[in-house]
Amino acid sequence: MQNYTLSQIAELLGAELQGDGALEITKIATLANARTGHIAFLANSKYRVQLEATQASAVIVNQADAAHFNGNKVIVSNPYVSYAKLAQFMDTTPRSASSGIHPSATIHPSANISKSAAIGANTVIEAGAVVGDNAQIGPNSFIGERVKIGAGTKLWPSVTIYHDVEIGSDCLFQANSVVGSDGFGYANERGQWLKIPQLGSVIIGDKVEIGASTTIDRGALDNTIIHSNVIIDNQCQIAHNVEVNSGTAIAGCSVLAGSVTIGKNCQIGGMTAINGHMSVCDGVIITGMSMVTKSITEPGIYSSGMPHTTNKEWRKSIAHLRNLSDMKSRLKALEALAKS
């Protein structure tokens, strides 16, 4: 990890510095675990009490919290965003593939691989594929026929990209993600399932991040589309003909069924399930473990998951839930009696 002085950090972040600008910072840490030479950050004022005990050599804070810390401080408007930017500067994550093409890679003669791209061991790249400048394809990955991968995109090991998929620039795909697998399309003829070939593809924009073991299915006729600046967590299922618009974040283990459309700048909590052919408008937040069975047309926060409680209380609640129909009928009867 490259070391920075506090003056350099303040300049990189466009921040105000109060303290020793020559102090050398070797690591970013939490307030609770920071030691000498570390810089910490306070992103939530409810943890302000930790400023008194922290051993950090410097702290990133906003203007309101700066008065509560007497040590070296870098003052910014949004400490969490500044932490993210500093972490990028100090990042030591290795490349997913060393420079050049590994001798064990199998690349079709018609594939167009940029001279600045890196291809890892045992990777297979099929006919007509295009890999852009400075792209990194991790070991044991598969790049299908006519796939297009944009400049600066990084694939970690064992990523599978099926035929005709198009991926933009500066994307990040974590290990074992699968893009372009068949959507779940079948017709039933007298009890026999007939597979419907999935003739669409997957189109992914720029600066998209896909989590480990996440699957994005190709469209049946039209394409599955993931617009630019979308982030999708680990172990998510994105079914055929889904469209996810820019700025949206989808947390782990969520499922979007076929032909779902998600608007811009939405946040979908973990383990959410959205039923097929639903649409969600821009600016919607769906809390974790929700089940969406009808379209959402107004921005706001939506929930349906049941918070945990003791088993005894949960059993009581379920017993009451099962009796709702009977209770409704009895209430109607009482209302009718009251009106008579």
Image (spheres, grey):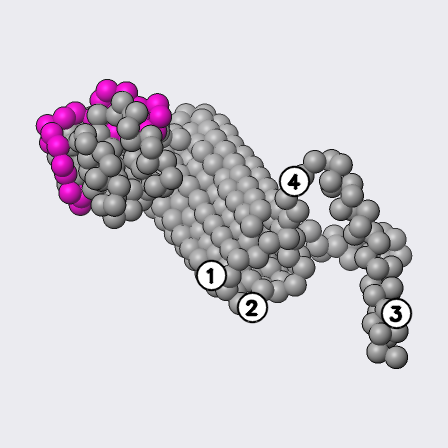
Residue pointed to by mark 3: 333
Residue pointed to by mark 4: 308
- Disc 3: CA contacts within 10 A as few (<14), some (14-19) or many (>=20): few
Nearer the observer: mark 2 or 4; the answer is 4
| Residue 245 at least partly seen | no
Q: Is residue 204 left or right of residue 214?
A: left
Residue at the far bottom in the pictured view: 340
- Distance between mark 1 and mark 3 Cα atoms: 43 Å
Residue pointed to by mark 2: 297
| Marks 2 and 4 in Cβ contact (< 8 Å) | no
- Distance between mark 2 and mark 4 Cα atoms: 29 Å
The image quarter in which residue 113 lies: top left
Label 1: which secondary element: loop
- Distance between mark 4 and mark 1 Cα atoms: 27 Å
| Marks 4 and 1 in Cβ contact (< 8 Å) | no
- Distance between mark 1 and mark 2 Cα atoms: 10 Å
Task: Please state, as top left, top right, bottom left or bottom right, where the N terminus lies in the image.
Answer: top left
Residue sitting at x 19%, y 30%: 71
Kind of residue sitting beneath label 2: Thr
- Disc 1: CA contacts within 10 A as few (<14), some (14-19) or many (>=20): some
- Distance between mark 3 and mark 2 Cα atoms: 36 Å
